[in-house]
Image (cartoon, rainbow, N blue to C red):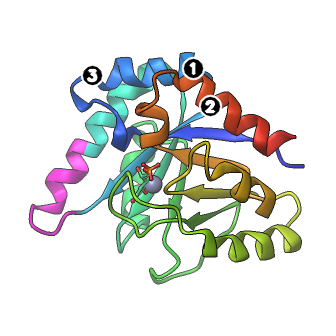
């Protein structure tokens, strides 16, 4: 099958210690770092973009694959500046306009916006359909993933696993990461 990529979501990290949090996850065996980039309408979007860029620049020093989840209506506008700042890959939402080139498909398993929400098992039908059609595609799931939900996601065919609260909240994140990797790879 397609190899597991475990991507801790930095949204659940301690923002005051981003660089060491990133390094901690890499030391615990993370493959990617998942970066949620969203525009909060109550503050000037540009300001948030600048924060996004500086955070990425900051995290470049750990040389990790930065998996950027663009929860914005105009993802293309973000690709160049974030790419220059060190982003490695992008996912965006199918509701936005334009062509959708497919190298990896992201299936949201919570309503986008927050960490710590409940996994939506009904999304596994989508994952399963995609996996049947595209045996070698990277299929990413995001939201509510952890030890109690990983088997459902892995059985449906997901291989890229974003996990925020279950990893950052664990006493032993390395154990949670390796458990999820096993579920996908075995
Ligand atoms: C939700 C974000 C997720 C979030 C996942 O909008 O896209 O990446 O951080 O957090 P958990 O794993 O806690 O559901
Ligand atoms: Zn995300």
Q: Is residue 40 above or below residue 8?
A: below
Residue at which label 1 appears: 28
Judge the density around disc 1: few (<14), some (14-19), many (≥20) Cα neighbours within 10 Å.
Answer: some
Residue at which label 3 appears: 17
Image quarter in which the C terminus is found: top right
Q: Give the mark nearer the N terminus: 1 vs 2.
A: 1
Residue at which label 2 appears: 177
Tag 3's secondary structure? helix
Query: Spatial distance from mark 2 to mark 3, Cα to Cα?
Result: 20 Å
How many discs appear?
Answer: 3
- CB at disc 1 and ligand 1 closer than 8 Å: no
Dot 1 and dot 2 residues touching (CB under 8 Å): yes
Tag 2's secondary structure? helix
Residue at image point 35% right, 74% down: 73
Judged left or right of residue 95, residue 184 is: right
Query: Which is more toward the observer, 165 or 108?
Result: 165
Residue at image point 52% right, 62% down: 119
Q: Is residue 55 above or below residue 143?
A: above
Residue at image point 60% right, 31% down: 176
Residue 4 showing in the rendered view: yes
Residue 2: x and y in percent read: 84, 48
Q: Give the mark nearer the N terminus: 2 vs 3.
A: 3
Residue at image point 43% right, 19% down: 61
- Of badges 3 and 1, nearer the viewer stands 1
Query: Spatial distance from mark 1 to mark 2, Cα to Cα?
Result: 7 Å
Residue 9 showing in the rendered view: no
Q: Give the mark nearer the N terminus: 3 vs 1.
A: 3
Judged left or right of residue 148, residue 81 is: left
Residue range (magenta)? 40-51
Residue 149: x and y in percent read: 62, 53
């Amino acid at each position: 099958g397609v190899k597991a990529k475990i991507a801790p979501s930095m949204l659940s990290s301690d923002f005051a210690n981003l660089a060491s949090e990133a390094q901690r996850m890499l030391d615990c065996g993370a493959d990617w770092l998942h970066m949620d980039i969203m525009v909060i309408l109550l503050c000037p979007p540009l300001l948030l973009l600048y924060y996004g860029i500086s955070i990425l620049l900051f995290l470049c020093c750990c040389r990790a694959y930065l998996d950027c989840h663009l929860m914005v209506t105009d993802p293309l506008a973000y690709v160049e500046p974030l790419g220059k700042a060190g982003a490695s890959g992008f996912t965006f939402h199918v509701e936005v306009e334009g062509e959708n080139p497919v190298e990896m498909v992201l299936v949201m398993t919570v309503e986008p916006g927050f960490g710590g929400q409940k996994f939506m098992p009904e999304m596994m039908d989508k994952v399963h359909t995609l996996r049947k059609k595209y045996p070698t595609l990277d299929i990413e799931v995001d939201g509510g993933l952890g030890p109690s939900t990983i088997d459902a996601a892995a059985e449906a065919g997901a291989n890229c696993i974003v996990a925020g609260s279950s990893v950052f909240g664990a006493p032993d994140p390395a154990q949670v990461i390796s458990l999820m990797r096993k579920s996908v790879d075995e």
